[in-house]
Structure formats: structure tokens, C-alpha cells
Image: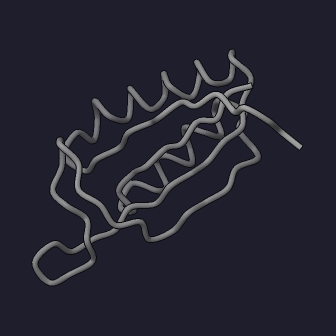
Amino acid sequence: MKIVFIVFNAAIEDEVMECLAKTGVSNYTKFPDIHGKGGHSDPHLDTQIWPGTNHGLLIAADVSLKDKILKEVKNLKAEYAKEGIKAFVFSPEEVA
């Protein structure tokens, strides 16, 4: 099992959710209104100077589903490069 954490501009939430539906993802934990600054997009700090926020999704997936998710994220990243989207993959040490 892998944990995929996706952070993305709230403005492209519909596109992200459509792509995840294509991969078969139906279970996730959503983190709304994440603030941050990355290297490939403007900061999303929900201020007058840096408006906007990010959302995050935490998804538990087997290896084949993880690969499908990463492929879709790469496609979205190419299409929405300035909005900001990134996926991180973790291996859980324990699951209870």
C-alpha cells in the first residue's frame, strides 16, 4: 500500500476530481484551504497580496492505482502548469 498526497490549487478542484474518478479513486481524505508556496506557481496564502488557497487529498492506494493517479497528476500538471499541482508518495509504516 502507498499513500498519495496531492496538493493543488483550489481553482482546478473539478479537474482533479474528474481525473481521480477516471482512475477509480472513490475513497480519500480532503484537506481544504491549505496555504503554501511552491517552486512552480505563485504562493497561495489567502491574503490580499497572495490570494487563493490549495486543497489536499490523501489517498491510500495499491501500487497499480498509485501509478494511475501519478499519471493523471502529470497530465494535469502539463495542462495547468501555472495553477500548481503536485503529488507526493509515502509508504505507511503501520496501518491499524
Which residue is situated farthest in the right direction here?
96
Q: Which residue occupies 46% across, 60% down?
A: 55
Where is the C terminus found, in terms of image quarters? top right
Q: Is residue 27 above or below residue 42?
A: above
Which residue is situated farthest in the left direction here?
49
Q: Which residue occupies 25% across, 65% down?
A: 44
Q: Position of residue 61 (x, y in %)?
A: 72, 30
Which residue is situated farthest in the front direction here?
93
Quarter location, residue 5 = top right
Q: What colouring method underlies this structural image?
A: one colour
Q: Position of residue 84 (x, y in %)?
A: 28, 47
Q: Is residue 50 above or below residue 4?
A: below
On the picture, is 38 further left or further right than 61? left
Q: Is residue 58 above or below residue 23?
A: below
Which residue is situated farthest in the bottom direction here?
48
Quarter location, residue 45 = bottom left
On the picture, is 24 further left or further right than 43? right
Q: Which residue occupies 75% across, 25% down?
A: 1
Q: Position of residue 62 (x, y in %)?
A: 74, 23
